[in-house]
Image (cartoon, rainbow, N blue to C red):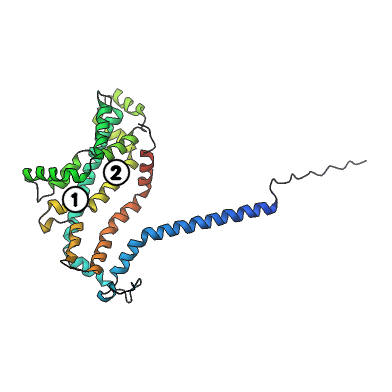
Amino acid sequence: MSLSRPTPTVKPSGLPVGSTATSRALLLLWRVLALALLVGISLLILYPALWMLSTALKSDAQVFTYPPVWIPSPPQWHNFVDAWYGAPFTRYTINTTLYALVVTAATVLANSFVAYGFAKLRFPGRDVMFAVMLASMMIPGMVTMIPQYILFSKLGWVGTYLPLVVPSFFASAFFTFMLRQYFLTVPNELSEAARVDGASELWIWWRVVMPLATPALATVAIFTFDGTWNSYVGPLLYLNDEKLYTLQVGLQFFRNGSQTQWQHLMAASLLVMLPVVAIFFAFQKYFVEGASLSGSVKG
């Protein structure tokens, strides 16, 4: 006599088939709507750059055509060459590059050094000094512009790069705060072990903390390089020799009195903007990581 084995029963799923299909359709619809929203916001943000590119490729007649022409026909690619050689932009590029690199290096070193002291050293009045430094962020730059100009004028620095470069060797509140927050994530055991081995604080800052803070340092470097490359008020205020002009000041070459060569101005502006965009995308990983971690640590 053979015994029949009972057939295993399949436990029904929690959701009906129709409900699962509906949820998948709603999820797909939500993703499509989110993608369409992001594309729309991206186009809105890119609108100025697209308009600059369109204007840079127009002829003189198409610049003032109404209604505006979005796609020039034919595109005037020679506007980029004419704009570049219409003024000494090669010299301006060399001036701006050297100026931005020196300021970026000085800013990273100075702010990281001060941030290390506030993050890893304990001394009387540390918190009060840090609070006073943060309070200086509430002072607008326009308020100190005239006293600084008077000071640099009495020092005989006007007409040189000294008023633009020397202040970067002193720490700023924003970058010091950002780096301090990141330095707090570095375990104190590392610096204590280095002190036991006889290392100085300068050695610990340079050989222990700095290599571990690459994302935060890259963030400060990108911010500084971008701000220095696009700086206009400072070079315009302190530089009076055309051979020392930076790119932002040199762009004013295309604005003569009441006439503006818009197609050449837009072409030159796009060329000036490309290095900053390239550097941002090249170091985007470090920028995002450093910016996110710098603001997520309690003081």
Q: Residue at x 38, y 43 (%)?
A: 289
Q: Which quarter of the rendered picture does the C terminus lie within?
A: top left
Q: Which badge, 2 or 1, comes first in the chain's sequence?
A: 1
x, y percentage for residue 253?
A: 17, 64
Please tell me whether mark 2 sits on a helix, a strand or a loop.
helix
Of residues 67 and 177, the one nearer the viewer is 67
Which residue is identified by label 2?
220
Circle 1 Cα neighbour tier, 10 Å, few/some/many (<14 / 14–19 / ≥20): some
Relative vertical location of residue 29 with respect to residue 87 in this rendering, above or below: above
Of residues 56 and 258, the one nearer the viewer is 258
Decide if residue 19 is in sight here: yes
x, y percentage for residue 170?
A: 19, 38
Quadrant hosting residue 165: top left
Circle 2 Cα neighbour tier, 10 Å, few/some/many (<14 / 14–19 / ≥20): many
Mark 2 and 1 residues: CB-CB less than 8 Å, in contact?
Answer: no
Q: Residue at x 23, y 46 (%)?
A: 104
Which residue is identified by label 1?
99
Q: Which amino acid does label 1 sit on?
A: Tyr
Residue 278 vs residue 5: left or right? Answer: left
Quadrant hosting residue 122: top left
Relative vertical location of residue 221 with respect to residue 114 in this rendering, above or below: below
Residue 64 — which label? none
Q: Which amino acid does label 2 sit on?
A: Val
Please tell me whether mark 1 sits on a helix, a strand or a loop.
helix
Q: Which quarter of the rendered picture does the N terminus lie within?
A: top right
Of residues 50 and 222, the one nearer the viewer is 50
x, y percentage for residue 75?
A: 31, 74
Query: How far apart are the two marked residues, 2 and 1, measured between alpha carbons?
Result: 16 Å
Q: Which residue is drawn at 28% across and 56% down?
A: 275
Relative vertical location of residue 202 with respect to residue 224 in this rendering, above or below: above
Residue 95 vs residue 7: left or right? Answer: left
x, y percentage for residue 6?
A: 83, 42
